[in-house]
Image: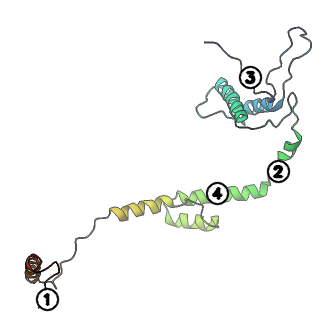
Amino acid sequence: MKKLSEVAPPGWGHTKAEKEKTKPDKPKSKIGGSAAAFKRALDDGRFKGLPGDKTKKEKTASMFKLMWSMKKKGAKPHYKPGTDEKKEKYQDESFEIDKSEHKKVQKKAKLRNLAKGNMNPNEKAAAEKKAGGPKLAFEGWKEKATSAVKKALKKKDAPKHDYGRDAGAEAKKKLKDKEHHKYVNFLDAPDN
């Protein structure tokens, strides 16, 4: 089995600096570009690898797999090759998080989770009241689904006995209709 070195797609930059064989003092490639940014994200823990990756080697391999699959799907690199500078159209990608708003949203999420998994009805009601706002999609769906299943599987009560019917009269009519069908026509016998 031949061992291949990890290579980023063309135009995505390099994670290793290679030197030219004829002129070792002049580098053939510089570290930088989207591949280097991806590597930095891996090194500082922002990129965790694909599910199932445990070692750094597996995570690095996943990084290159993702770059190649993104390139095949038409994604363009955001960084200029050989530099840590973003291309012009991706300059305004950064954003600021308002810490006070973020704290409010975190608190609401915490209360909502408390209300969702709580068995104590009073505590649950208080948490729901504090969380405020409409319920999230699929919130409480499990309870509704279990009640619907219970309702569907609930044993049906046997029909109550109808004392207003006369079994003898019904049997007599059936025999009369049968004879009428045989000798007269397909319609039921007249009631008289």
Secondary structure, mark 4, is helix
Looking at the picture, does residue 70 appear above or below residue 175?
above
**Separation of residues labelled 4 and 3 (CA atoms):** 42 Å
Residue 191 in percent (x, y) is at 13, 89
**Separation of residues labelled 3 and 2 (CA atoms):** 34 Å
Name the N-terminal-most of marks 1 and 3: 3
**Separation of residues labelled 1 and 4 (CA atoms):** 72 Å
Q: Which residue is mark 1?
A: 191
Residue 122 in percent (x, y) is at 52, 67
Name the N-terminal-most of marks 2 and 4: 2
What's the residue type where badge 2 is placed? Answer: Glu
Secondary structure, mark 3, is loop
Cβ–Cβ under 8 Å for marks 2 and 1: no
Residue 1 in percent (x, y) is at 60, 12
- Of marks 4 and 3, the one in the foreground: 3
Residue found at the far top of this picture: 22
**Separation of residues labelled 2 and 1 (CA atoms):** 88 Å
- Of marks 3 and 2, the one in the foreground: 3
**Separation of residues labelled 1 and 3 (CA atoms):** 94 Å
Q: Which residue is mark 2?
A: 96
Looking at the picture, does residue 52 appear above or below residue 172?
above
Q: Is residue 9 left or right of residue 109?
A: right
- Of marks 1 and 3, the one in the foreground: 1
Cβ–Cβ under 8 Å for marks 4 and 3: no
Q: Which residue is mark 3?
A: 7
Q: Which residue is mark 4?
A: 109
What's the residue type where badge 4 is placed? Answer: Ala
Identify the residue at image location x=86%, y=23%.
30
Identify the residue at image location x=82%, y=50%.
96
Name the N-terminal-most of marks 1 and 4: 4
Disc 1: CA contacts within 10 A as few (<14), some (14-19) or many (>=20): few
Disc 2: CA contacts within 10 A as few (<14), some (14-19) or many (>=20): few
